[in-house]
Image (tube, rainbow, N blue to C red):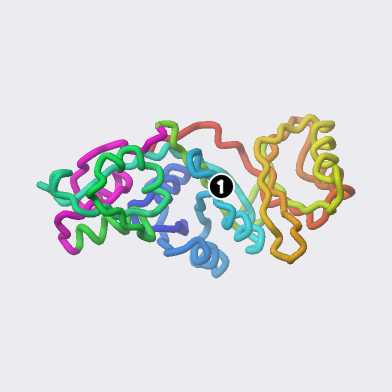
């Protein structure tokens, strides 16, 4: 089984993929961007994709909602991963030796309380956490550190100078498992939908009232501009289903109050918070 991820071997996407699927029976397909991750899936070069959708500290990755909707792929599952950020460098290096720290901008942002202790160190944004670790290892860069997962430190032979440097100790990321509609079982206790509403007072409220009448718990709502020049929005909503409802019921009820209504996926809620 091949799983497409955004990032290089050793990144948090790989950790999530190996935890969600059986660790020993999957092949990771690294991709440089989220666009390429989905294109790899669409081209049949991977069976599933793992995509980060929300971080407890940084919020939602709005672009990924749009990517998933426009790709025609479906959300088949979710995985919650506790993110521990670690400062790492070549063996024998001390924090006092470090002149610059490289990592993905979101990883840097998650560690600013720790990093603010070292105003003399230059922070450099990169495309990937694990990729930063790999470059240090391959080029034997002294005076340079990376922020990445403990897996990356192990894979690329780096020493962790400071573990768990994330500011928010309840730092977790929610990942979507994405695949073709034919690979879903259409069962689950959670559904993700998207829709737009009319430009008039109470249009969104009417949708929320109908969901309440169905005794459906709204666990998340996110708005994204439709980019049509008319300041209209797409709403992305996560719903927790009761035993008496399913996605077909939701779609039938909401069709009268929305436009561009689409069920993005039916899946089982990721209750457990897995450690990285």
Residue depicted at x 49% and y 44%: 58
The reply, left or right, for residue 151 in relation to residue 82 is: left
- The vertical placement of 190 against 129, above or below, is above
Residue 94 is situated, as x and y percent measured from the top left of the image, at: 13, 44
- Whether residue 254 is visible: yes
Residue depicted at x 44% and y 36%: 171
Element under label 1?
A: strand
Quarter of the picture holding the C terminus: top left
- The vertical placement of 205 against 133, above or below, is above
> Residue reaching furthest left?
92
Q: Splitting the image into 4 quarters, where does residue 136 fall?
A: bottom left
Q: Splitting the image into 4 quarters, where does residue 140 fall?
A: bottom left
Give the residue pinned by disc 1. Answer: 60
- The vertical placement of 276 against 74, above or below, is above
User: Closer to the camera, 96 or 17?
Assistant: 96
Residue 9 is situated, as x and y percent measured from the top left of the image, at: 34, 56
Residue 31 painted magenta: no
User: Closer to the camera, 238 or 198?
Assistant: 198
What's drawn in magenta, residue-wise?
A: 139-168
User: Closer to the camera, 41 or 94?
Assistant: 94
Q: Splitting the image into 4 quarters, where does residue 114 fall?
A: top left
**Other-residue count near label 1 (Cα within 10 Å), few / some / many at <14 / 14–19 / ≥20:** some
> Residue reaching furthest right?
256
> Residue reaching furthest front?
119
Residue 140 painted magenta: yes
- The mark tally for this picture is 1
Residue 272 is situated, as x and y percent measured from the top left of the image, at: 50, 31
Residue 71 is situated, as x and y percent measured from the top left of the image, at: 63, 63
């Amino acid at each position: 089984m091949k799983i497409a991820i955004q990032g290089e071997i050793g990144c948090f996407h790989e950790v999530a993929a190996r935890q969600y699927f059986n660790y020993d029976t999957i092949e990771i397909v690294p991709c440089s961007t989220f666009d390429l991750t989905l294109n790899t899936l669409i081209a049949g070069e991977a069976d599933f994709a793992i995509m980060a959708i929300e971080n407890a500290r940084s919020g939602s990755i709005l672009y990924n909602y749009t990517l998933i909707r426009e790709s025609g792929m479906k959300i088949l599952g979710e995985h919650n991963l506790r993110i521990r950020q670690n400062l790492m460098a070549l063996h024998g290096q001390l924090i006092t030796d470090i002149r610059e720290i490289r990592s993905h901008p979101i990883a840097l942002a998650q560690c600013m309380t720790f990093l603010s202790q070292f105003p003399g160190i230059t922070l450099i944004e990169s495309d990937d956490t694990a990729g930063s670790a790999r470059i240090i290892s391959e080029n034997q860069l002294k005076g340079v550190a990376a922020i990445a997962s403990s897996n990356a430190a192990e894979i690329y032979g780096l020493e962790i100078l400071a573990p768990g440097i994330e500011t928010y100790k309840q730092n977790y990321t929610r990942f979507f498992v994405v695949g073709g509609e034919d690979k879903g079982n259409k069962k689950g206790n959670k559904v993700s939908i998207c829709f737009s509403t009319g430009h008039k007072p109470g249009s969104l409220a009417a949708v929320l009232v109908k969901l309440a009448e169905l005794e459906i718990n709204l666990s998340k709502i996110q708005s994204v501009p439709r980019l049509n020049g008319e300041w209209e929005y797409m709403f992305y909503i996560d719903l927790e289903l009761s035993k008496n409802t399913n996605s077909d019921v939701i779609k039938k009820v909401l069709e009268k109050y929305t436009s561009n209504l689409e069920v993005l996926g039916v899946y089982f809620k990721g209750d457990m918070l897995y450690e990285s």
